[in-house]
Amino acid sequence: MKRFEIISQRANVLEPGKADYFEIRNRWNEHYFKNTHPLTVELACGRGEYAVHLAKMFPDRNYVGVDVKGDRLWKGSTWAVEQAITNVAFLRAQILTIETFFGENEVDEIWLTFPDPRPRKRDEKRRLTHARFLSMYKHILQPDGYFRFKTDNTALFEYTLEELGQREDVRDLVVTHDLYQSEWRTECFDIQTRFEGIFTAKGEKIKYLRFRFRDA
């Protein structure tokens, strides 16, 4: 409860009840960051490791971490405050409502890092790489924007590849089943989430893919 109280007072966390929560769509750079830098979104960000580390590495870009768990967002928010990183913010929201908060072509890049694999068949539509979510991501992404996905879960990764294989609007697809032994390792900057560290220590190989959407 103390963490919830803290983030309720922080400017770098947008959540229900705050004045700008439902007015931020199409206004992230203009209203929040007050610049015209490219905007990267980390979905299901958890504690926001990627959002915070990337924001620190690339001060000429803006970052927003999205998660529904306020206690997790508290951690990323705290890191940002302690390190005076001002080009990162956090949005407390369901990914299903992502188009409420980001307008068409407003986002330059999306990271999806270690989401819940939702292994039960009845939860398939809740997987964050299901077709309905991919269509949302396409809507908010710039035409040349990359969607990047990391997971330790082989079943979810294979499911995602199947979903992408059924689409005609996927281009420039890169896939590796062992990120740290691949040529694509450098574009992930060796940033590890807490879950990634846990599963890597257990010997799990990290899977990674990235692609762009075709306009048509």
Image (spheres, rainbow, N blue to C red):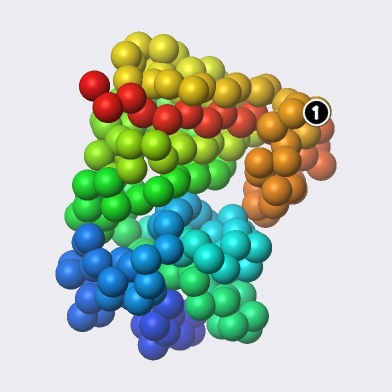
Q: Quadrant of residue 181?
A: top right
Q: In the picture, which quadrant includes the N terminus? A: bottom left
Q: Residues within 10 Å of mark 1 (few under 14, many from 20)?
A: few
Q: Quadrant of residue 110?
A: top left
Q: Quadrant of residue 216?
A: top left
Q: Nearer the viewer, residue 151 or 62?
A: 62
Please say if 72 is above or below 11.
Answer: above
Residue at the (42%, 84%) spot, across then down: 10
Horizontal and vertical percent for residue 117? 49, 33
> From this viewpoint, is residue 84 visible?
yes
Horizontal and vertical percent for residue 21? 24, 71
Q: Nearer the viewer, residue 19 or 198?
A: 19
Q: Amino acid at mark 1?
A: Gln
Please say if 94 is above or below 70.
Answer: above
Instruction: Kindly identify which residue carries mark 1.
Output: 181
> From this viewpoint, is residue 70 visible?
no
Residue at the (72%, 41%) spot, across then down: 186
Left or right, 188 with respect to 141, comes to: right
Residue at the (27%, 27%) spot, across then down: 215
The secondary structure type at the circle numbered 1 is: helix
Horizontal and vertical percent for residue 102? 26, 55
Left or right, 65 with respect to 152, comes to: left
Please say if 65 is above or below 125.
Answer: below
The number of numbered discs placed on residues in the rendered structure image is 1
Horizontal and vertical percent for residue 138? 30, 35
Q: Nearer the viewer, residue 191 or 62?
A: 62
Left or right, 178 with respect to 89, comes to: right
